[in-house]
Image (cartoon, grey):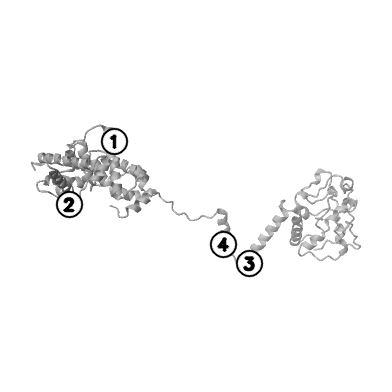
Amino acid sequence: MSRSDDDDDVTADQQLIAGRVAPGDEALAQLLAVMRAMADGPEPRPSAALEALMTPAPRPAPQPARAPAGRVAWRRALRWAAGLGIAGKVALGAGVAVAATTGVATIPAVPDAVQRPVNHALVRVERFLVGESPEVEVREPDAPPAPSTEPGDASPAAADPGRSAAVPKAPDDKDRGTSTDEPGQDGPAGAPGSDEDAKGTPDGPSTQGLDSRSTTAPTWHRTLVPGWPAVEDGSTEGTDGREPADPTPSPSETSATAQPDEGQGGGNGTASGGSEPQE
Amino acid sequence: MLDDFDEVLARARTGAAEAFALLYHDLARPVAAYIRSHGVPDVEDVSSEVFLATFTGLERFTGDQAGFRSWVFTIAHRRVMDHWRRVAREVPTTAYEPVEDDRTVASAESGALEVLGTQTVVELLGRLTQEQREVLTLRVVADLTVEQVAAVVGRSEGAVKALQRRGLATLRREIERKVAPL
């Protein structure tokens, strides 16, 4: 076989493989056609691993942005409030104001400087609404520390400023002595107005002093609390702790007559009282 | 053939699932036919192994679409060799069961199938040597050039041509002997 014959054979093979049917090779051409047809057969099913590789990762369905539960409740409340009538809105606002004020007056975490005026304002509002007798007075909120050495002086009134201010003080409430009713004002033992002074007799100056303190209102109270009646007796504002005596106390003020602070150890108590506004 | 092969290949290199699918659908059938022509019974398993190896080794491939096709069949060739080494047996010669054959063939080739079934072709290819069968299947089923086949089997182009010529001669003889009654 010459080289030319080899080339011819190669060329014939190439044409045969390319699908051209040479004379005399129909059967072989048919076989090769079947071989090509095998490549047009059904696509093999991929394995699980290959299928996973060719399958796009499912994207999570877009979830609607969910607001926090607190925010949802707040929006719901706003929608509810927006649907109220004018009267309802006014009532709602007043309720929110009262609740906020009460919270300020009662929550121990609120500083005393803020709590005291709010506390007294609430007391006065309560008295106004309830219609208590004028004899029921508010105790002096700004009483100086006149601690008692008795542990029992840490009365519930001291723990609850709102209640201590609202509870009427009986004139013979001698158990109170001169210890302050204000929370956080229990001074150390031996301080002015301690045991000896606090243990006065019921009709003694101790009781009077207690009553005096409970019937007075501080100057800052008058200025800070809106609606506080104008002070008619400017002399009641003692800066030296000495309360000028009210020359003509009204009968209703007999229990609230300002007296020299017997339990204040010489008058370092806040000079107030005597001018308790009558409601 | 993919019109935007380079783009698809680039996406496949980034791990895009749809690019893998495009490459698979483009070559799955010829690869499966190549594997089937070698008498491998588990065509789907071996073809899946081929494409898994292809997709996981894309970083090592450089070339065009023809080179990629040659590269895939190189992997298929090695997988087939591994398979036969593993099972250590010859091409099966079990009887063909038409009921179990759900394959379809293009209409242009229907005439040939009336005379020669796929299983018959597989049986005839089994009469060839391993190298001749390898070259002919790569040339005909995989539609590779002589150069590409030479690259796949690791031989020269001359050797591929020689193997091709001897393989065709063997088939011609076997067909004349087997199909002569037709």
The spot of residue A199 in percent (x, y) is 88, 46
Residue A79 tag number: 4
What residue do we see at 20% from left, 50% from top? B106
Front residue of A229/B171: it is B171
Query: Which quadrant would residue A226 be assigned to in this image?
Result: bottom right
Q: CA distance from mark 2 to mark 1?
A: 34 Å
Outermost residue to the front: A3
**Callout 2, which amino acid?**
Ala
The residue under label 1 is B82
Q: Which residue is mark 3?
A: A87
* Residue at x 90%, y 55% (from the top left corner): A260
Label disc, if present, on residue B108 of the rendered structure = 2
**10 Å neighbourhood of mark 3: few (<14), some, or many (≥20)?**
few
Q: Label 2 lies in what chain? A: B
Q: Image quadrant for the C terminus of chain B?
A: top left
Are the residues flagged by discs 4 and 3 from a single subunit? yes
For the residue carrying disc 4, how many other residues have a C-alpha within 10 Å: few (<14), some (14-19), or many (20+)? Answer: few
